[in-house]
Amino acid sequence: VTPGPASAPASVDALQQALAEEQYIAERALAVPIYLALRLKRPLFLEGEAGVGKTEVAKALAAALHRPLIRLQCYEGLDVSHAVYEWNYPRQLLEIRLLETTPDLDRTAVARELFTETFLIKRPLLRALEENGDRPPVLLIDEIDRADEEFEGYLLEFLSDFQVTIPELGTIRASQPPVVVVTSNRTREVHDALKRRCVYSWIPYPDFEKELKIVTSKVPGASARLAREVTAFVQELRTADLYKSAGISETLDWAAALVALDREVLDADLIEETLGLLLKNQEDIDSVRGERIQTLLARAMDLATR
Amino acid sequence: VNALVTNLLLFGRVLRAAGLQVHHGRLVDAIRALEWTGVGSRNDVREVLRALLVHRHDDLAVFDEAFDLFFRAHGSSELNLPLFSLGERARVVAKREAGVPPRVEVEDIAGGTSSAAAFAVGAYSPVEVSRTKDFGEFTAGELEAARRLLLRMPWDPGHRRTRRWERATQGPIDLRRILRRNVMRGGALVDLPRRVRRDAPRPIVVLADVSGSMDRYSRVLLYFACGLARSAGHVESFLFATRLTRVTRRVAAPGGARAVTQLVRELQDWGGGTRIGEALRTFNTTWARRVMRHGPVVLVVSDGWDRGDPALLDRELARVRRSCARLIWLNPLLGSARYEPLTRGMQTALQHVDDFLPVHNLTSVERLATHLRRLPPGRHGIHRHV
């Protein structure tokens, strides 16, 4: 890792610039909250539909700030042993056997020796407190809405103190708190108490200009014309009444696929053949197929040439 | 700087008046933040305040509206803001036809003569209500008795298995605790702690048809929905006729008859035909992602008179079924011995439902309660007979 500036960017413009160098295009409505989160040392809470680039923010931010990224993927039932720490039981059991063969074994030492850092498995939250120096990591807590309320409660405590207590070892505290990014797909409302501690930002689907920039920067192989047409079509597709709209990553996959197929122009047949890259829901695919593709394509061409 | 602070405090008050929860600490943050970013760009000021003062997607529109109003009025030193309209969300407003007087809930101590009055009194009612009489034939007095019964009915919707562990006397061995416990005893494994998956109440989603053809049953079925929502915990409620509305909070709120009376009054406006397919489509696209978590039991309450597209109903109902643990269709007409589910809508629906049950009298409601209680746990562990 090349050492860059350790401090936070001096202004919103500088932050936008730094993110742009990591090929992340952040408009003002996103750059300002990120900047504030860094300056206020508060978690950044990003909410939005799946596929609008919430996770990417954390990755780009870590790269722009030259800090390691630690990711915690949430799921139902996520608990301390998977989020914070766990003892390495097999090794502890093995150690007990070894100790048993020791001729004069000090019984009281056993307990002490079994619960040392050697046997500790550190999970993301604990690692985020430890990896430190002048570059505390970026901690990404991804899809918090998938975790249950119990974990949310724990997180609330963690984010206010940035410390973890392990009964056998004591309290571990961050000398400098990590930069925290929390994301939610809003499959449920996350509790207000947690969100209140954060800087909040809603990320909408990108507009045509922004998405075009993303496509051109991430799929350099696409011709200017193809990039415009692809972007325009996805934009139109998002206005269609579907269960699940195409996210940015779908746009990028699709553009890359069309480049791999050596295509320069969109046409209805091509779209129909590759629709599975954009829509991942059989009902949605069926409802778009046929005439609707023609209509969407016509509108997209209109948008692309505007 | 002083003017800025004054304005921010004022703006905070405006937001609170509009229904946002604005924390004092966040206003302090906002003052600091504006010192860093400056107040030169109006757009940046907006972004700063939005990031710090809003923490819900639903509040964003209100915030923008308030911001525009506030900073427009700001130019004309006088604080004469049309703030009264702020924060007012679109509600279902009953439009009554001319000539029809709006029904008023009267606290009639002398003993009401109109059915609305009798309904609203909510006092002791001597009427004994038959458990087998059809809801559609209830008198005002019986409705009142049914209300008290249904609102207080204890529900136990069964359980779903969560992915969280808890201590138990049987089940797989809990390695995490095994060592800590046994090391205290010198390292010999004497004690084997165990753990099992914890159970949680199974969530329920109610989709109730309140269209014209359900008229005779709507009120009682709303009591049923209210009682269920209050007693069972995780219940999401929706009403539909030609369109679909979420009423979860209103139905679960305490206040007994009043909430239902209010809903019923609004329903008069809904009337008309049912488009079940379209209602379910709205449900699937707008709400399902948020309310169909953890494998709920879905209760559709409808007589199946569908004026919409049967193909759409077919498709959407199939989707509902795929995303829930069990799909139960409750039809008040099924109570009649002569009834046969011949309507096109009902025919379509029957291909997808797991259970087709009557809901026409108190006995049938009690049977439903027993049925729900007996559903096995397990996230998707309910066996289906296709």
Image (cartoon, coloured by chain):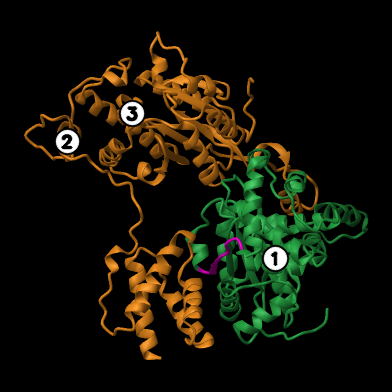
Q: Is residue B61 above or below residue B108?
A: below
Element carrying mark 2: helix
Q: Is residue B302 magenta?
A: no
Residue B109 in percent (x, y) is at 9, 37
Nearer to me, B162 or A246: A246
Nearer to me, B238 or B76: B76
The residue at which mark 3 appears reads as B212
Q: In which quarter of the image is residue A95?
A: bottom right
Contact between marks 1 and 2 (CB within 8 A): the answer is no
Palette colour of chain B: orange
Q: Is residue A204 magenta?
A: yes
* Circle 3 Cα neighbour tier, 10 Å, few/some/many (<14 / 14–19 / ≥20): some
Which chain is displayed in green in the rendered image?
A
Q: In this view, does A163 lie above or below B175?
A: below
- Are discs 1 and 2 located on one and the same chain? no
Q: In which quarter of the image is residue B261?
A: top left
Q: Give the range drawn in magenta.
A: A197-206
Element carrying mark 1: helix
Position of residue B218 in the picture relative to residue B371 (left or right): left
- Of marks 2 and 3, the one in the foreground: 3
Name which residue type carries label 3: Gly
Q: Mark 2 or mark 3: which comes first in sequence?
A: 2
Name which residue type carries label 1: Glu
Contact between marks 2 and 3 (CB within 8 A): the answer is no
The residue at which mark 2 appears reads as B121
Residue A3 in percent (x, y) is at 80, 84
Element carrying mark 3: helix
On-image quarter of the C terminus of chain B: top right
Which residue reaches farthest top? B338
- Whole-number angstrom distance, CA of label 2 to CA of label 3: 26 Å
- Whole-number angstrom distance, CA of label 3 to CA of label 1: 50 Å
The residue at which mark 1 appears reads as A56
